Image (spheres, rainbow, N blue to C red):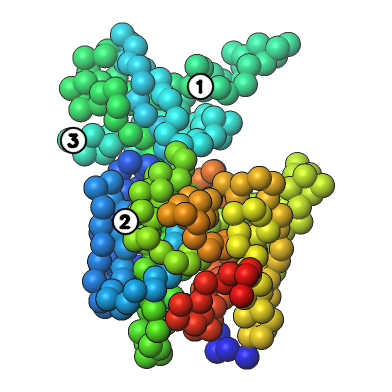
Amino acid sequence: MAAKPVLKKTSMAFMERYLNNASPTGYEAEGQKIWMDYVRPYVDTFITDTYGTAVGVINPDAEFKVVIEGHSDEISWYVNYITDNGLIYVIRNGGSDHMIAPSKRVHIHTKKGIVKGVFGWPAIHTRNRDKEEHPKIDNLHIDIGCDTKAQVEEMGVHVGCVITYPDEFIILNENKFVCRAIDNRMGGFMIAEVARLLSENKKKLPFGLYITNSVQEEVGLRGAEMITNTIKPNIAIVTDVCHDTTTPMINKRIEGEVQIGKGPVVTYAPAVQNNLREHILDTAEKNQIPFQRLASSRVTGTDTDAFAYSNGGVASALISLPLRYMHTTVEMVHKDDVENVIRLIYESLLTIKNNETFSYFK
């Protein structure tokens, strides 16, 4: 059985700092700098692109290229309209959930710094109880304590400012990691840990490894679309999150059965190359790494799709981290799953041969 990599104190410190940092879609650069500083000792060089994707490269001169990938951005809001009496209306930046917004505290990012505010909501006493209105984009507003539009603008807030939630990392019951933006900065953390393990265990790979932290996944896989055309990889192993379906109000007949704490989730989908997926499953079984299976109809909805269908076709697979309460500020994952995703990617890389195409026609 492969040695289980216990997350080190330095790893945990990086994880917390990286998760707590705001990296909304389109504004990922500061988070990418944190990630690159951590990965720097474990790679030979970096690639960055115009929109902020960061790639740590091991063996950059190798012709055969393998990608391991996560995405760095988090859902957020944009300032869309400021009323004469100083209230702010918003639009989504990514799949922000209007249902969780009322009474949440927010950070509005301006050139003058963070402006704090709250999503206001009418008191229960004042709402129409016969036909109660639910939160939606056109009735959500942010209050930053101003009385006029001029006051809002004096604070540096204008249309187009991006808005994030300030909720930070906590641990519940010793092994549940909770934070906003675990989707999918935990992916960036896990691929960084793979780089660390390869370095610390002095593993030499026969191919080039591209540890890729993509931007703008939450608005259509855009960062992955760009960087795959730059790297032109032969193989891509993507990690993202998927839904724990054991909490209330989720239909397992529709969503499948997945649970935090029971291991990484390996996806079956048209974009997933079957032989590469089986290589990953064989690796899990040989190394006694627990895993779960999930089927995705048509698309995976992750950067796997962007890599798979690029450059004439790239053998791609998806290893997901089961997560509760996606796109909320209390996203939750299990420590054991985080460690086992790291193990599964690490061990899978060690058994990929140079120039392995995973072709169906050998």
* Residue 208 image offset from top left, x and y in percent: 36, 75
Q: Which amino acid, mark 2?
A: Thr
Query: Which residue occupies 28% across, 37% down?
Result: 109
Q: Which amino acid, mark 3?
A: Lys
Q: CA distance from mark 1 to mark 3?
A: 25 Å
Secondary structure under tag 3 reads loop
* Residue 279 image offset from top left, x and y in percent: 62, 75
Residue behind mark 1: 137
Residue behind mark 3: 111
* Residue 16 image offset from top left, x and y in percent: 40, 63
Q: CA distance from mark 3 to mark 2?
A: 32 Å
Q: Which amino acid, mark 1?
A: Ile
Name the foreground residue: 347 vs 351: 351
Whether residue 24 sits left or right of residue 269 in the image: it is: left
Secondary structure under tag 1 reads helix
Q: Looking at the figure, which quarter contains the C terminus? A: bottom right
- Is residue 312 among what the camera can see? yes
Query: Which residue occupies 76% across, 56% down?
Result: 257
Residue behind mark 2: 230
Query: Which residue occupies 44% across, 21% down?
Result: 141
Tag 1: Cα neighbours inside 10 Å, few (<14), some, or many (≥20)? some
Tag 2: Cα neighbours inside 10 Å, few (<14), some, or many (≥20)? few
